Image (tube, rainbow, N blue to C red):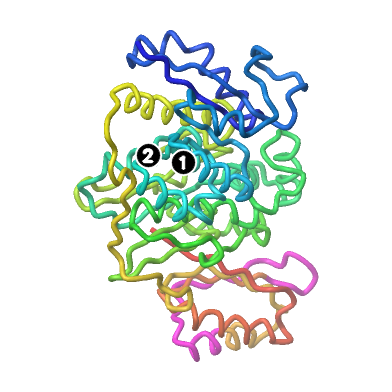
Amino acid sequence: MKKIKVGLIGFGTIGSGVVKALKTKRSFLRDRTGVDIVIDKICDKDISTKRPVKVSKKVLTKSIGKVLYDPDIDIVVELVGGVYPARDIILEALRQGKHVVTANKALLSEVGDDVFGLANRLGLLVGFEASVGGGIPIIKSLREGFIANKIELIYGIINGTSNFILSNMAEGGLSFDDALELAQKKGYAEHDPSLDIEGIDSAHKLSILALLGFGVHVKPKKIYTEGISDIEPVDIEYAREHGYAIKLLAIAKRSGTSLELRVHPTLIPVDHLLASVGGAYNAIFVRGDLVGDNLFYGRGAGPEPTSSAVVADIVDIAKVVQEDAKIENSIIFKKDVTGLKHMNDVRSRYYMRFSAVDKPGVLAKISGILGKYDISIATVTQKEKRSSQIAPIVMMTHEALERDMARALKEINALSVIKKKSVRVRVEG
């Protein structure tokens, strides 16, 4: 049995998890798959700090070249993170005839065309299951399991930090700041949590899902992205009264011949499959024309689930290497939409909360402006005062154009009777 040699670049938390999995499960994987996978080299700028897994000093190196230019290494695993120098590492590994496995969502969302294009030209494989959803096998399912389907939509709760925060606001009544502090204490949120709470991490992952589901590569900066920092516990409470939960949702949705791509807080019905996804868990809802509705659920981050996905990719590629199979156009993304729909042209229903002075005529002013922009009100409730002279007005609208809603809110927020920026959350499902 041929030994398939792996060179790993990046020996941090995830890298350590991958090494531990490959070492402890070597015989288990060999018995189940018929391939013998060994770690030949591990490269990191820090090879002296103690890791949670023991490795021989012979395999450790600070030199990337000793991985990239070693003719015995079959598969390079990139776990450096970020776009640069990771892009250059992966491209050089491919040029050296090595297959690649990566968990790098930022890189694939930004320069995936470079990586996949070169891999195709050279007849090499790129595994990237761990780039979205941790250990959830969503990449393989979209690439292979749903190959006969025309994908209609993908909804994703794909950032565990934001979901943990919203869950604790909903279940524990915590403020946003308190829920964020708890997430940081538990290690779910970074010291600077902006990538998570502002939706940027979700946009990176949505870019990859859109490529798989619809064949279009859209860079994150072109995806409408809105975070959760404006959501307050009262919004979660009022949403629940109307039969909805609030989630940070990544949406890829066919709209005629165009594609809607957006990340923002979203009201979804409490009986929707995604509504009960709590804590730091991820879930991805996929609708295909043949298969119907499917939900993928699991741990979206952390060394164990991410290692599970990385090792799965290594095993798949190792089988190909062992069989010495010829690969042509290994990564094909067939575009089946004409382009990206501008956010201004998206139609949605809306939840709105206005913090207004409690006096006659206020509701009429707000309603008049909404009517001016063809926004029809479905329900309206004036809540008890939450502070001196300020009474929340909560509305649910019928479907309206995003452009019209933005103009209406700008005009409403300029009213002297509105004392705080109005909250608007889109509705799906």
* Camera sees residue 102: yes
In the displayed structure, 224 sits above or below 184; it is: below
Of labels 1 and 2, earlier in sequence is: 1
Q: Please tell me whether residue 280 is drawn above or below residue 379 in the rendered image.
A: above
Place of residue 74 in the rendered image (x, y in percent of width and height, measured from the top left): 45, 27
Which residue is depicted at the point 49% across and 47% down? 157
Displayed quadrant of residue 342: bottom left
Instruction: In this rendered view, identify the residue nearer to me: 408 or 367.
Output: 408
Please state which amino acid type lies under the numbered disc 1: Leu
Instruction: Give the quarter of the image for residue 264.
Output: bottom right
CB contact under 8 Å: marks 1 and 2: yes
Q: Which mark is residue 74?
A: none
Q: Which labelled disc corresponds to residue 94?
A: 1
Circle 1 sits in a helix, a strand or a loop, which is it? Answer: helix
**Does residue 34 belong to the magenta stretch?**
no
The residue to which callout 2 is attached is 124
Type of the residue with mark 2: Leu
- At a point 42% along the width and 45% down the height, the residue shown is 284
- Which stretch is magenta? 367-391
Residue 121's place in the image compared with 136, above or below, is below
